[in-house]
Image: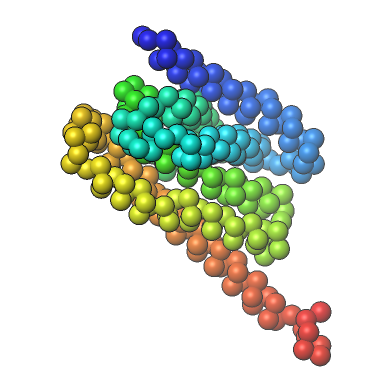
Amino acid sequence: MDPFSQLILAISVTSFLTFQWLFHKVSPWISKRISPGFLGLSDKQKVEWNSRTVSTFHALLVGIFCLCILFFDDAVNEDPVWGDPTLVKTNVAITTGYLISDLLLIFYYWKAIGDKFFVVHHLAALYAYYYVLGQGMLPYFANFRLLAEFSTPCVNQRWFFEVLGYPKSSRPNMANGVAMAVVFFMVRIAVMPVYYSRMYAVYGTEAFYLVPWGGRVAWICSSICLDIMNIMWMHKIARGCYKVLRSAHWSKASTPQENGKTD
């Protein structure tokens, strides 16, 4: 094993241990000090709270790293299939450690945070990342997929509001719900044409045929699988936002008025 591969393995293991530590020690310690409502949560809610806190930290960390690569890593942008994968592999190694850590927590706390779609999502991503880490292929596409993590903090913040007792029709929760839907759409749905057009541009080139069949399957099938789930989640989020906004509208319309103004 070459020294860089050893480094990537070390980063993945360190990432796994770090996210386990954040879940079991750091999140509970910080949460009960900055949010008094945390102590009033049920055991299942505390498990999900800590899981979402960790996923928020991971999303911000790798998301910022992704943007740096997207804007400043010329080697990856110029050759999306075989460009120098050094920075991408480092970022993917961090995510690999997180995904394995999160899978372990999902299975262990299945009654609290178990979700078959998240299991499929994590396994599909890990299958694709195996080829990125093992053979350094497709760095641009691996990095592009990680941009979707920017939607995670908004999704989690909405859950935090709700579990702490903010009604869905409250202004903070409504504003966060709209922001969540917009961000989710922008980083997971609106970017699909860009992603697949770049994939189509690469298809049939010499660089494409250098990718082994397993890598092509991991690349194409994992992308389609993940985006089907993204569309399902977007549909669910949009329906939820519509119901909340509609409920708020009718609540406002039914409020007694005086001199043409609501109280």
Q: Position of residue 42 (x, y in %)?
A: 68, 40
Residue at point 74%, 80% (across, down): 255
Camera sees residue 225: no
**252 above or below 207?**
below
Q: How many numbered marks appear? A: 0
Q: Is 107 or 53 nearer to us in this picture?
A: 53
Q: Position of residue 80 (x, y in %)?
A: 33, 37
**186 above or below 38?**
below
Residue at point 45%, 18% (across, down): 8
Q: Position of residue 161 (x, y in %)?
A: 68, 51
| Placement of the C terminus among the 4 image quadrants | bottom right
Residue at point 63%, 37% (across, down): 53
Q: Is residue 217 left or right of 156 when viewed as pictured?
A: left
**3 above or below 84?**
above
Q: Is 257 or 145 nearer to us in this picture?
A: 145
| Placement of the N terminus among the 4 image quadrants | top left
Residue at point 71%, 42% (across, down): 41
